[in-house]
Amino acid sequence: MTTIRIADDARQNGRSRLTDEVALPRTTSTVQLNAGEGDDHICNIRTQPRVPSRLVRGSTVDDQPDEDPSLRIPSDFKGKQKFKGRVLMWLAYQSIGVIYGDIGTSPLYVFSSTFSSAPSRKDLVGMNITHRDPREASMVRMKRYSSSELERTGRRVRHHIESSKVAREVLKTIGVLAVTMVLSDGLLTPAQSVLGAVQGIEVVQPNISKGTVIGVTDAILVVLFSIQPLGITKISYAFSPIIIIWLALNAGFGIYNLVKYDTSVLKAFDPGLAFEFLIRHGENGWRMLGGVLLAFTGVEALFADLGAFDRRAIQISWLGYTFPCILLAYIGQAAYISVHPEAYSNPFYNAAPRGTIYPALVMAILAAIVASQAIITATFQLLKQVMKLSYFPQCKVVHTSRIFYGQLFIPLANWLLMIGTILVASIYNNTTSLGNAYGVCVMFVTFFDTCMVSLAAMFVWQINPYLVFFPWLVIACFDGTYLSSALTKVPSGAWFTITLSSILAAIFLVWRYGKEQQWSAEAEDRFPTSHFVATDPDGQLHLTDKYGGNPIKTIRGLGIFFDKAGETTPVVFSQFVFKLTSIPEVTIFFHLRPLEMPSVTLENRYSVSRLAIPNCYRLVVRYGYNDEIITTNLASILVDQVRKYLVLEEMPQQDRLPSPPVAAITTEGPGCSPLDNNGTNSPTTEKEAENARQSSDRLARLQNAYEHKVLYIIGKEQMKIKTDASFFIKVFLYLFLWIRDNTRNKMANLRVPTDKLIEVGFLKEI
């Protein structure tokens, strides 16, 4: 007996639903299709309405093609979530606590990092810090527009890029480097922000030892990473009020200092003064730009976190609150320093109004600790996309919200990031050393983003390339100026982030290259079953002439082939047939397809289809990240779903409508016809009678095969590097194979009985 359990008590209409139990019949084929019962063998760990299973009816002809519509349905692809009203405002509130901690704490150190001596009033307005607005990136759907939709020049540009292998590889490398540089800064940001927060205690306790500072920093980092499994929604309950108060405090201080000291600093909004500053200071002014860029560090995390939040929510929280508060903070500090130039070394605390130093210190420490959350969340988001695009082995991803699908947590990345930040904080042990390593990667990312957005403007937004070129040139020049200034920090610390990002990029590119070689090798065995298996007029199976034409023996029992790809024929099945020239009496291709949604309704959960080989079925199980698959007896679950499909196929078309809430169909033997709801024989035509007889035969064969023997067949693929490959290709592929052999198999959690498990080994050359 197969038992279906619910992991957590699900509640419906305020009452707890009891555990369901469904017994798999042994001697008769009985299927009960009940709209009110959830005998689907996949449990939702949260409350979920129950509806009947959706079964895809196949053709009644045995030589049907293998490409069936159940492989891909529109709901398989992630759609954009749209929020309105209170939910949108709630998401905007969350984004303040998660995203803006990094860029919101920049007023603590920008002026001290920019100037090495007391600045003049001209220098303060010339730096033009207040005019820097983070650029927006566009979230575009991966879609290829036809050439006729593009401008003529755009068509030519796209043609040159697509026809040039060098251009494609350069764009791929730029995209990967942009991601790895954000991840590298993600190792520094928590260490920098938390260490800076703890060092702020020196304002009121100058004698605090360095060992105490490092110990407290490491303890806070451990706590910070330990709460990440709670998810963004829960974390934001504590973090959002801190950042909201912190930004309000900065805005209040800014207004106070602006009114009291020097309102003329508002002239800093004139961009011409920035050019005067650079002309006046020459090379030294150019070097100061490395400190100015700290004013917008955090922008890279802002856009990376778009996956966890809605774009409109970020626009509301940024333009409506965060950006004005940060502007007022810089304006107020500039006004204070214009009167007290020596205050540049610690502008936030020196510019704090009298009597507010202790509240400001407490909020600064809390805000600096929270500042790490932006890059931590961005790391999870980027790694999820990297894995989805097959640039990194699959790791466990935990979705933390059933409302906001993009909010997630990656345990492995979290703990590795925690270890890395603790080591960085302990080794560098002061924010000055960390600051030298900080910021270079941010400017690389902004420059790469400028190039990528320009391509999107031409090929996605369909803007004439001549109109794109001038804005790209202007922004690229700004990025290049800041980048060249930041590169002066490479010898004094920035080499660390560049080296780390290069190593990560090499790993990503090696894995992707290896996967491409693997896919190319596997494609030799991935084709429809009709390509290599044919049926004689007497029903005997044999290989096609291309593969020798040998007869295929039938093995009694049920064979369940695990299909990891869910496309055409599983490689393990073709290898099984080629090597043993045998096939189980009944064959099921079983594929698990995870979807990026909390749960999949029963009507969309199962897809069963019949393939060209007699008694061969494909079963696709779709599940969400809150669904828990119970595999107490996997074979009985699959047989039950195939049986429902066959019974549904046997029924007349009018009786397959879901109008009756319960339909019980019983077949006592091959010659029995199903009964309709009125108790009369449904097949009234000779064709329907023949179809009913064939379906009854398939039901009987399915039941007999299940009762005789069940075999779970999994492929064990080994790869060998071709001897004629070049030295560098061999090195890349050896690294790929080493990583592949040390990562977990996707089938590791199925827990099938080992006495019924068969591994079919096969070797592929790459």
Image (spheres, rainbow, N blue to C red):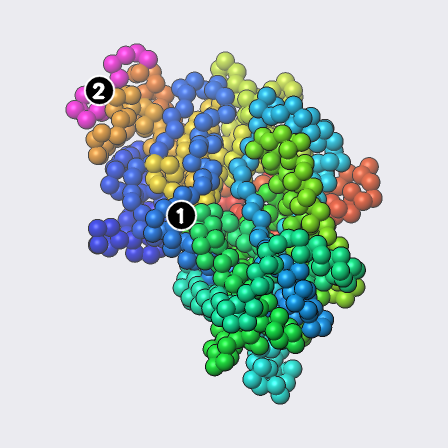
Image position of 534 with respect to 53: above or below: above
* Front in this rendered view, residue 180 or 261: 261
Q: Residue at x 57, y 33 (%)?
A: 460
Give the spatial CA distance, label 1 vs label 2: 42 Å
Helix, strand or loop for disc 2: loop
Q: Quadrant of residue 493?
A: bottom right
* Of the image marks 1 and 2, the number of the one nearer the N terminus: 1
Q: Residue at x 62, y 70 (%)?
A: 338
- The region drawn magenta spans 674-687
The residue under label 1 is: 598
Q: Is residue 611 left or right of residue 294?
A: left
Q: Quadrant of residue 491?
A: bottom right
Image coordinates of residue 68 in percent, x first then y, are: 47, 26
Q: Is residue 499 left or right of residue 237?
A: right
Label 2 environment density (alpha carbons within 10 Å; few <14, some 14–19, many ≥20): few
Is residue 105 in sight in this rendering?
no
Image coordinates of residue 124 in percent, x first then y, are: 65, 65
Image coordinates of residue 362 in percent, x first then y, are: 49, 76
The residue under label 2 is: 681
Amino acid bearing label 2:
Asn
Helix, strand or loop for disc 1: loop
Per the picture, the main secondary structure of the magenta-coloured stretch is: loop
Q: Is residue 186 left or right of residue 234?
A: right
Is residue 724 in sight in this rendering?
yes
